[in-house]
Amino acid sequence: MARTGDPGAALAQLLGGWNAERVILCGMAGARGGLHEAAYACCPIDVAGWSDHSARFDLGGRRITIAPGVAGLNDNGHSDVMRGEETQVFGAMALAPDLTYGRHLIVLPGTHSKWVHVEDGRITGFSTHMTGELFELLGASTLSVTGANVANDDDEGFAAGLARSAEGAPLTASLFEARAAQLREGKSSGWGRGFVSGLLIGTETHAQTVAGPRSVVMIGEPRLAARYRKALAHWSVGALVMDGEDCAMAGLRLLDADD
């Protein structure tokens, strides 16, 4: 749901003439300054505890349910939060019940990528990487040379960035290679963009799997999931990919069933 000066009006406009008596939402609708704040549920948390923390209220004759976000500690022992991804994680467990047994690592690529630890059906902790947001910000930076050849060799650049991430050079130094290669090696701006993507995703995936399992569950949209799957394969890590929208809908249905 888009943020506006009046989130309630934005929701009404989005629903239009749809006569829905109940509306179930997740993500930033429950953030501070959103439609209605839904307090964070703390790890470890299972689906029942998560549902119990949902915000439920009436608005314009409709019964509104908003999923809570989840708060916990990242892999370094510091505070971390998420809103929306937890709905997809619980939805994934509903779609694939085997995920409710034992330990699993679930990755949700995106603006703020989440690496979620699940144990016996509970979210026990997670770590956030701002990979997607950094990529977008760097796309408007000096790393892209104006007037550079815009040939469609993004995949070649991605492979080069992924390979560079494996060398362990400082990220802040390696990033500038995207610009230098355009100026000195005839690389295109498309190659540079791919290089930055491969470097960032490679750095993220290596950090999360260097001492982790040899396989993960991935929840996301197909194109981005394909990139992460390629990066994980570079580290000899397999991935079971699940559709992000399917998982989100399955998670929201859990809240619907609970009412």
Image (spheres, rainbow, N blue to C red):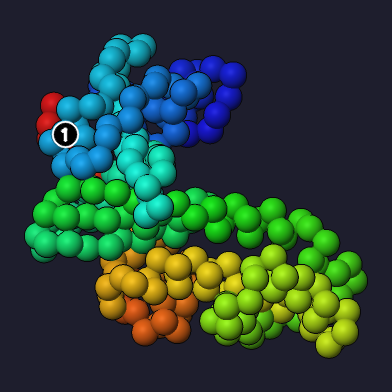
Q: Is residue 87 above or below residue 59?
A: below
Residue at 12% from the left image edge and 31% from the top image edge? 258
- The picture quadrant where one finds residue 81 is top left
Can you tell which quarter of the image residue 50 is in? top left
Pointer 1 local density, CA inside 10 Å: few below 14, some 14–19, many at least 20:
some
**Kind of residue at disc 1:** Gly
Work out whether residue 42 can be spotted.
Answer: yes
Q: Measured from the top left, where is residue 131 in percent x and y?
A: 55, 58
| Location of residue 249 with respect to 1 vertically, above or below | below
Tell me if residue 127 can be seen: no
Label 1 element class: helix
* The furthest residue to the front: 77
Q: Quadrant of the C terminus?
A: top left
**Image location of residue 202, percent across then percent down:** 52, 73
Q: Residue at x 88, y 84 (%)?
A: 184
The residue positioned 49% from the left and 55% from the top of the image is 129
- Taking the image as shown, residue 184 lies to the left or right of residue 226, namely right
Q: Position of residue 43 (x, y in %)?
A: 25, 40
Residue 83 image offset from top left, x and y in percent: 39, 39
Q: Which residue is mark 1?
A: 49
Residue for point 69% across, 53% down: 137
Q: In the figure, 11 relative to 215: above or below?
A: above
